[in-house]
Every structure is written in structure tokens, then in C-alpha cells.
Amino acid sequence: MTRVIIVRHGETDWNKVGRYQGHEPTQLNASGRAQAQATDVALQKIKFDAVYSSDLPRAYQTVQIITNLPIHMDSRLREPHYGVFQGLTYAEMQAQYPTEFAAWYPERKIAPPDGETPEQIANRAASFLEDMQLLKNKTVLVVSHGELIQVLLCLCLKEPLANQKAYIVDNVSITEIAHSDGEWHLLRFNDTTHLS
């Protein structure tokens, strides 16, 4: 069985105000660093065979706090690219790009202007999952981003991507999936008990 522990990155200042980060190189704030330290404590008893992280700073800073093991930086784990919406809140998107926002939100069946398509996002997530399946009988730590984790879970559970909003995850939440007998299984979802 391949066991994959997925952690969403810690809080950033943009998270606090609902600003879409996408591929922007935002950093953890003080709260995000404290969250990552709490996650380190929660995961200390798990022996990881490999560690993967998005190459964006907020994810990489999170994983550096959690583990001292070598980290495989993987751009496939990045948050989706939101194009012209990056750096904006919902209210700012609606004010600056009303037509484009209405076409994109909430179903997100198309790409935002200059952003990634749903197919591009799903393809890189699926490619990463295929690589995880090759790590037989390993326990892997993965640090990524909210929407990318939602897409990973939809793919694992063979659900349409339109269902991704059912899998919203909090900052530094712990989600666990396992691959056995040719199938992915969801073992733990959005666990934040280590923050209480």
C-alpha cells in the first residue's frame, strides 16, 4: 500500500483577506509558520520515505518547517494559475472583469483570462498521482495548495471535477489517501485537530 499524507500550506496574508494567489510567490505569515510548527508536531511519529512539495514559496516554507528530509520540488503541485484574477479578491474580480468573472465563477468550466484550463490542472494532478502509485509500500508527505488538493481528491475518488468544492481544505489541514489493489482510498480528510 502506498500512503500519501497531503498537507495544505500554512496561512499567508493573502489568505486572510481572500486574495487569489495562484502562481504568485506569496510567503507564510507568522500565523502560517506557527501552523506549520504544529503540523510538524502532529506528524513526528510518521516515518516518511519521500517528501514532495509545490515549488511556490508558501508551500516550500511549510514543508521546510515540517521535515528535515530531502524535498522533491514539483511544479505539478502548484495552485492553478488564475490569470488576470491573481492578486484579486472576488469583489475586485467582479468589479474589474465582470463579464469574465461571470463566465468563470462558480463552476470554473473554462480558464480565467490568461489562466489554466480545468483540463491542464487535472492533467498535471493526474500525472503526479500516477507517479505516487509507483512508490510501492512507501509513505509520502506532500505539501500543496487548496484547489490542487481538491482536484487530486476528485481524481482519486473518480468524481467529476465539478464536485471539487466538496473537498475544500483548511490551511495546514492533513488529508490522507492510500493506493492499494489498483484503487485510491480516502483515509482522512481536512484534519485540523493539531491546531486546537
Image (cartoon, rainbow, N blue to C red):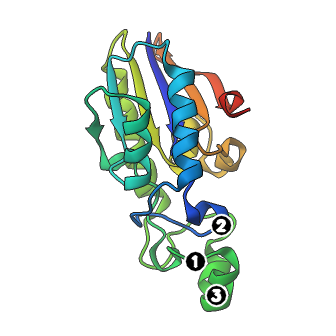
* Drawn side of residue 74 relative to residue 193, left or right: left
SS for tag 1? loop
Determine crowd level at label 2: few under 14, some 14-19, many 20+ residues with C-alpha closer than 10 A: few
**Of the pair 13 and 118, the residue shown nearer to us:** 13
| Three-letter amino acid code at the position of disc 2 | Gly
Q: Is residue 91 above or below residue 161?
A: below
Element under disc 2? loop
- N-terminal of the pair, mark 1 or mark 3, is 1
Mark 3, residue position: 99
Q: Which residue is mark 2?
A: 18
- Can residue 44 be spotted in the picture? yes
**Could you tell me which quadrant the N terminus lies in?**
top left
The x, y position of residue 175, in whole percent, is: 59, 30
Q: Which of disc 3 and disc 2 is earlier in sequence?
A: 2
Measured from the top left, where is residue 84 in percent x and y? 48, 80
Q: Residue at x 39, y 22 (%)?
A: 140
Above or below — where is 12 with respect to 186? below
Of the image marks 2 and 1, the number of the one nearer the N terminus:
2
Disc 3 residue type? Answer: Thr
Residue 174 pos. (x, y %):
59, 31
Residue drawn at x 31%, y 18% as measured from the top left: 135
Q: Taking 187 as reference, is 37 above or below it?
A: below
- Residue, disc 1: 88
